[in-house]
Image: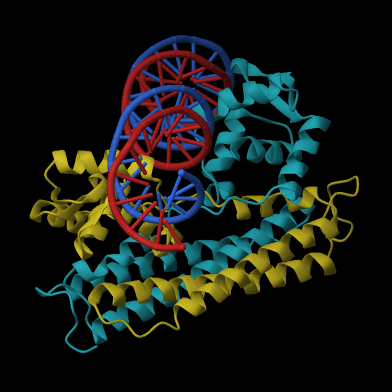
Chain colours: A yellow, B cyan, C blue, D red
Amino acid sequence: MSLRHALLGMLAERPMSGYDLTKSFDRSLGHVWTARHSQIYPELARLRDEGLIRQVEEGPRGRKTYEVTDAGLVEVRRWMTGTEPERSKREEAFLRVFFLWLLPPQEAADYLRRQAAYHQDTLERYLEYAQAPPPGTDAELSYRLALEAGIRHEKALLSWAQWAAAEVEARPTGSRGGRRRKSA
Amino acid sequence: MSLRHALLGMLAERPMSGYDLTKSFDRSLGHVWTARHSQIYPELARLRDEGLIRQVEEGPRGRKTYEVTDAGLVEVRRWMTGTEPERSKREEAFLRVFFLWLLPPQEAADYLRRQAAYHQDTLERYLEYAQAPPPGTDAELSYRLALEAGIRHEKALLSWAQWAAAEVEARPTGSRGGRRRKSA
DNA sequence: GCCTCCATGTAATTGGTTACATGATTCT
DNA sequence: AGAATCATGTAACCAATTACATGGAGGC
């Protein structure tokens, strides 16, 4: 249940509405966690009922701005230091790699080249973000650390995908009837 | 809905029971996708009803061994080449990095050191797997490609976590009252 | 007046985890 | 005889996505 902690963490930076939070998920935060407005609004109501956030303003169109309470800050810190992060084990792109041998060699290599292109694109986007002026706030400094993780991650997987594609082209894996390779 | 494709892909290697498949998820495949038996058994029943797999044997204790059908192989190949893999966006460990500024500097550095230790452990485990005899089958060769991705991934994130911890210790981020850093 | 964006919510469905439930076989 | 492991299933619950639904404010 990390959604609530993501919301608390974001509200710790500055008071925001559900609409603002939804946009935040669509932007930077979306690289590590996603949420739709349909999940955010009910969760905000629960956090408010539990006293972890409070509504500070009512704007036009029924806009509700929330800020984190002291109890909310305690809770987000407890989450960060007192629990181990769950490691997501749902990497569909790598699940497919286990089954590449089911494809003819050229299609397997094509798949890996497409993955390389994906990582290349993502890396370029991250490098652009990194062009932004150096961090002015503590929050921006944390953001910069996360961005650097993304950059290294994408670089590693880009070079892996290129290597793997070349590997498959050189020592073709792929179903040509049998399952056992000619040369062990 | 990748669970069904994971099951089809595994059954393409050799016929297995729900129990065998559950164990496979607990082992190698578990690094990229997880599933419990309570999800596997109903899904196998659906795949059988749809003609993508068929039961080939009834063993002791009601053990049911399934094999993939031609239609099942077509489906798993369509999935691999005809659809784009969904990129999971639930990286709780990196979500927390965005909020490191909420912790006192030393606790933030501690968090990053613990992440480094995690990546170190995982990397060592992967390197041990890589000691195994070279791939004999096409499936094992694909598995080796996936393993190499894991190794490069863990290496990159290990070195990132070490760098970030040192960075936080050198230019402390963390809440000491205000939000704006002393030195921009 | 019309379009876009702002803004909030609920309902239905799917995918996944945890808990419940049962029993046979094999090993010691 | 007892423990460990093999083996299958269902039910209840939770998290998340997609679809449904409404309306105000601001710009042109």
Q: Position of residue C5 (x, y in %)?
A: 41, 56
With B65 as the anchor, is A129 left or right in this view?
Answer: left
- The quarter holding residue B132 reads bottom right
Q: Quadrant of the C terminus of chain B?
A: bottom left
Q: Position of residue B78 (x, y in %)?
A: 76, 42
With B123 as the anchor, is B10 left or right in this view?
Answer: right
Image label count? 0
Q: Is residue B122 above or below residue B163?
A: above
Q: Position of residue D20 (x, y in %)?
A: 47, 28
Task: Tell me which residue sits at (75%, 50%) in the image.
Answer: B81
Q: Is residue B57 above or below residue B123?
A: above
Seen from the viewer's position, the closer of residues B70 and A66 is A66
Q: Is residue B91 shown to the viewer in this render?
A: no
Task: Tell me which residue sits at (24%, 59%) in the image.
Answer: A9
> Which residue occupies the extreme bottom position in the image?
B183
Q: Quadrant of the N terminus of chain B?
A: top right
Task: Tell me which residue sits at (67%, 68%) in the image.
Answer: A116
Q: Is residue A34 shown to the viewer in this render?
A: yes
Task: Tell me which residue sits at (27%, 67%) in the image.
Answer: B111
Seen from the viewer's position, the closer of residues A99 and A68 is A68
With B157 as the anchor, is B79 left or right in this view?
Answer: right
Q: Is residue D10 above or below residue A125?
A: above
Q: Position of residue A157 (x, y in %)?
A: 59, 69
